[in-house]
Amino acid sequence: MPTNQQRRDAAKRKLARQLARRQEQDRARRQRLVIVGVIAAVLVISGGVWLFLSQKSKDETAADSTTTAGSSASAETPTSEAPTTPCSYPASGTSAKDVSAPTNLEPLNSGTVQSTIVMNGQDVPISLDRALAPCGVNSFLSLASQGFFDDSTCTRLTVSDGLNILQCGDPSGKGNGGPGYSFASEVATDATYPVGTVALANAGADTNGSQFFIVYGPSTIPASYTIIGTVTGDGMSVVNGIAAQGVQKGAKSGPPNAEVVIAKVTVPGDALEGTGTYATTSAAANSELPSDVLPLESGAPTAEAPSVEVPAETPVESTPGGAG
C-alpha cells in the first residue's frame, strides 16, 4: 500500500503533467489562430484583386465587398483563451446555496489544514492535505468559510462488503445538489481509500463539487475520486455510531436511519490565503514524468440533466452535473 508521501508525490507529478499539457494546448491554439488569420487575409486580398480585374466599372462596389469580408474574418477570431491557472472552477448547474466559487486559482499546494465537521453535535476533526488535492482542498475551505455546509444533512449511507461510506455536502438534502461550479479531478493512478479517508463524490471525471464522503469500513473503490484529507482524533467513532444504525428500510445504500446533521464546518481564518508553487513546462519535461495525461476540464451537464442509474456501490451523486 503506498504511503501518504508516495501519494503526495504522485499527485504533484500529475499536477505538473496537467499544467504542462494545458500550456502546450494553449500554444497550439495560438499557432492555429495565427495560421487561420493568415489564410483569411490571403483570401480577402485575393478576392479584392479578382473583383478589381473583372469589374473595373464597379470599383466602389468591389471595395465595399472587400471591407465587409475583412470585417467578417476578424469577427471569427477568438478573443479569449482557456485558463492557464492551476485551478479552474467553471459554472455548472444551479447552486444549492448562495455561494461564490473560489477566487484564488493558485492556492497553496503543500502542508495540511486542520478543520472540524460538527456532526450531530459532535466534533469530527479532519486533516486536509493540500499536496494531494490543492484545488479540491481550496474549494472545500472556500465553501466552509461561506457557511455552505451549515445546517445540512448527510443524505447517503452505504453498508455492504464492497463499500462503506457516509456521503454529505448537499444543503438541498436531495443528494444531487452542488455549489454551482465544478472542477477537475486530482487523483493519483494508485490512489487507495482506507478507513478514515475523506474524498469528493462526483458524477464522472472532472465533475467535482461540494459533496464528499467518509470511508468508515473496508471498501473497494476505483482510483477515480479526489482525496482531500483524513478523519483524525476520535472522529471515526462519531461516523461509526451513525453507520451502526444502518440504512432506512434495511437497504444497502440510501438515507441513514439516524438523521445526520452538520451544524457547521470550521476552518482557520487564514485558510484561503497564500499562493502555491507550481511546476512549469521546463519541470514537466523531466523524463521521469510519463507523457500520458487526462483532460483538465470537461463540459459538465447542467442540474436539469435527467437522472441516470448509478451502481449501488459507487460513491457518486445520483444525477450528473447537478451533483457535486
Image (tube, rainbow, N blue to C red):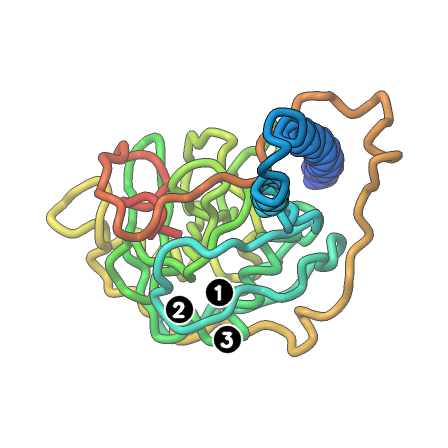
Residue 12: quarter of image = top right
Q: Residues within 10 Å of mark 3 (few under 14, many from 20)?
A: some
Residue marked by disc 1: 124
Q: Residue at x 64, y 32 (%)?
A: 56
Q: Which mark sits nearer the N-terminus, 2 or 3?
A: 2
Distance (Cα) linking label 1 and label 2: 7 Å
Q: Which mark sits nearer the N-terminus, 1 or 2?
A: 2
Query: Considering depth in this image, is 203 or 79 the residue closer to the camera?
Result: 79
Labels 1 & 2 near each other (Cβ < 8 A): yes
Q: Residues within 10 Å of mark 1 (few under 14, many from 20)?
A: many
Q: Which mark sits nearer the N-terminus, 1 or 3?
A: 1
Q: Residue at x 42, y 50 (%)?
A: 213
Give the total number of marks visible in the rendering.
Answer: 3
Residue marked by disc 2: 119
Residue marked by disc 3: 146
Could you say where residue 18 lies in the image, as x and y percent from the top left?
68, 36
Query: Considering depth in this image, is 120 or 25 the residue closer to the camera?
Result: 25
Q: Secondary structure at mark 1?
A: strand
Could you say where residue 180 lies in the image, as x and y percent from the top left?
41, 60
Q: Please indicate whether residue 62 sits to the left or right of residue 93 in the image.
A: right
Labels 1 & 3 near each other (Cβ < 8 A): no
Relative vertical location of residue 290 with respect to residue 304 in this rendering, above or below: above
Q: Is residue 10 visible?
A: no
Q: Secondary structure at mark 2?
A: strand
Nearer to us of marks 1 and 3 is: 3
Could you say where residue 78 lies in the image, as x and y percent from the top left?
61, 45
